[in-house]
Amino acid sequence: MLVDPEVSPCAGSLAESADTDVAGTLAEEPANGRLQFDVSSSCDSVWQDPAMRHMCAHPEYLAVFARTQNFIMRGDGPLPFDIRHYIAIMAAELHQCQALMEQLQDEFLASGGEPRWLEGLHLAPKKLQDLSEVNKTLAHRPWLLSKAHIERLVRGRDNWSLGELLQALTILAHYHAASSFVHGCRVVTEPCADAAAGKKSGSSTPGSGVAKENGKISSSPPRGVPVDELMHKIKSLRQQAGPTGSAPADSERPTGHERVDGEPAPTEVGAGRRLADTDDSHVGGDSDWEEPLRRTDGGATFRVQDYNWEDHGFSLVNRLYSDVGYLLDDKFRKAYHLTYQTMGSFRAVDTRPFRRAIWRYIQCLYGIRHDDYDYKMVSELLDRRLKELIKTTCVSPELLDSTTPLSRVMAGFQRSEKIHVVILCLEARLQSELLYALRAVMRYTT
């Protein structure tokens, strides 16, 4: 599947990579129980979670995702459990992810949350109401998140401490991205049907049978035209790079978003797609939601050389929200390096160019640019329909429906490979939102 061939898909630890787009400093995890989460012993929670049950095709990634989510929502931190779940509801409601909302509402009430708050954000404490603007900005236009947003929240009568705010921002970004994942997987197929069948027949832990099928591929779909074309393009680009792997000259590189982002952003939410009983005062609901901005200049762009996860974000989030940086860093790496070295029915495939193109394209949508990357690769490796699907999954996942299934866009790809593309959407979006949030916090504190 989609990853570096030198990284064993079954290895317990990840090899170092020259890519710095996802890798933070993968420091040793503290040896304490807070960071442990055994998926095999938490089968019920996996299958009840709308996001995790799709991840059963990739049990290694599922393990790090579950461990991170468990820590954010149930581990150490300054926010009470009911407040954490209410913030998560605000994030999921923004993208109309009903499956996540229903699960989170149950957990909110089980954590001792006030039932009246679920009737509308206006019935929640003012401290939570004040978070609404940041929630919408972070989801739709994170590049506009500023020092002023942070200042308004940490000062005044109903103020947040920096530790509380950092945890709240992490929860918001996590569940924005999880909403993208759930909506994205919904257009692949029904939730993990083959794995569910295996579970009912008494197979082992969630995803073990699916991983064996998709990792070793005992039965492969026929080669689809998109897969054949993509393999040809990867081979052609490698030949163009020559024996040294050198990239094209700077003059050959596209410099504007319009060169890699040829599709217009979604501009409106379809009629009838708001959740039932949702009005302007509901949790996270607002008729004036700002849709993703179609940027026409470089004003919102920032260079990862100036601010990135490895050198800046990782240390700041770990300082203000202990241990979560290690978990996020591990999750970014695992998603990016996950591989079974296949693409459709092809074997022994180096899919780094394809994975990198997806990650770079998503960060480009969010105004994050890499000076050392040739963006021509994005246009070469991601066709128009796939880019449209990736963009919608990231910026307006609520617009996805069964009329545009991922299986039609990625004909010939394994089901697990399609899910991996949606995982990349989840993680690249999450990292992008966190970078803007952490940059705003850094500017406030300096």
Image (cartoon, grey):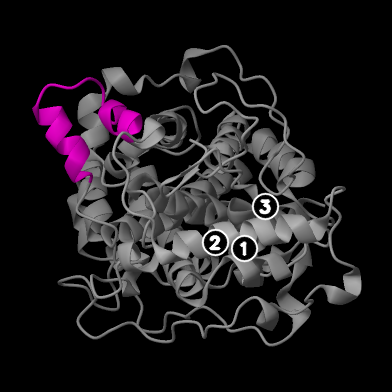
| Position of residue 354 in the picture relative to residue 27 (left or right) | left
Residue 230: which disc?
2
Residue 43 percent coordinates (x, y): 23, 25
Instruction: Using the image, determine if residue 419 lies above or below residue 389.
Output: above
Q: What residue range appears in magenta?
A: 192-213
| Quadrant of residue 248 within the rendered picture | bottom right
Question: Residue 205 magenta-drawn?
Answer: yes
Q: Do the residues labelled 3 and 1 touch (CB within 8 Å)?
A: no
Residue annotated with mark 1: 233
Q: Residue at x 89, y 70 (%)?
A: 250
Kindly check if marks 2 and 3 are in contact, taking CB atoms under 8 A apart as contact.
no
Q: Position of residue 44 (x, y in %)?
A: 20, 28
Question: Which amino acid does the dot numbered 3 rest on?
Answer: Leu
Tell me residue 87's x, y (percent): 39, 52
Q: What secondary structure is found at the residue carrying circle 2?
A: helix
Q: Which label lies toward us, 2 or 3?
A: 2
What secondary structure is marked by label 1? Answer: helix
Q: Which residue is drawn at 65% across and 30% down?
A: 6
> Magenta stretch: dominant SS?
helix
Q: Mark 2 touching mark 1, by CB under 8 A?
A: yes
Q: Is residue 317 above or below residue 160?
A: above
Label 3 belongs to which residue?
438
Q: In which quarter of the image is residue 159?
A: bottom right
Query: In front here: 434 or 255?
Result: 255
Q: From this viewpoint, is residue 130 visible? A: no
- Of 7 and 108, nearer the camera is 7
Q: Earlier in the sequence, mark 2 or mark 3?
A: 2
Q: What residue type is labelled 1?
A: Lys
x, y percent for residue 402? 23, 70
Instruction: Give the alpha-carbon distance from disc 2 to disc 1, as whole Å.
Output: 5 Å
> Disc 3 versus disc 1: distance between alpha carbons?
37 Å
